[in-house]
Image (tube, helix red, strand yellow):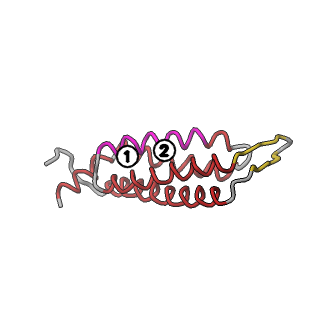
Amino acid sequence: MSDTQVTGWVGWGWFAGIVLLIAGIFDAIRGFIALLQPDSAYFVVNGNLFLLDVQGWGWWHLIIGVLLILVAIALFTGATWARVIAIILAAVSAISQLALLPAQPWWSLIVIILDIFVIYALTVHGKEMKAAREGD
């Protein structure tokens, strides 16, 4: 049995797991679609040209999506390793959104804010998920 007391704040941990699960599903679908249409894409944003290898992008999102889904499922079991990996993935996601800020400012800001909430939930209230699971 754990020393951690389960409070109403355990919902933050569930929130983080659900956000990661949804993000993983979206990433996996986006990656799968990109793999079905593997052409290069060109974007012009504010006079800057972006070249994107869609197949490489698709593999990246498919792999990250599957990882996010697996980590989210493990979070629901209260696994400590899943909290650590989830925090790392959320931090990488937030940092990577900075590169997309010029192209998609609103989407990037929303994702960064969600990543910050996930990091907060898992660092401050993550132990409660394990304690709640052990109490079942």
Q: Quadrant of residue 35?
A: bottom right
**Is 124 or 68 nearer to us in this picture?**
68
In the picture, the disc for residue 122 is: 1
Q: Position of residue 112 (x, y in %)?
A: 57, 46
User: Does residue 83 show up magenta in the picture?
Assistant: yes
- Secondary structure beneath disc 1? helix
Q: Which mark is residue 90?
A: 2
Question: Which quadrant of the figure has residue 94?
Answer: top right
Magenta: main secondary structure equals helix
**Mark 1 / mark 2, whichever is N-terminal:** 2
| Above or below, 103 relative to 77 | above
Q: What element does badge 2 sit on?
A: helix
How many C-alpha atoms fall within 10 Å of the one at disc 1: few (<14), some, or many (≥20)? many
Residue 119 placement, left or right of 44: left
Instruction: Judge left or right: residue 8 versus residue 48.
Output: left
Front-lying residue, 58 or 108: 58
x, y percent for residue 32: 58, 59
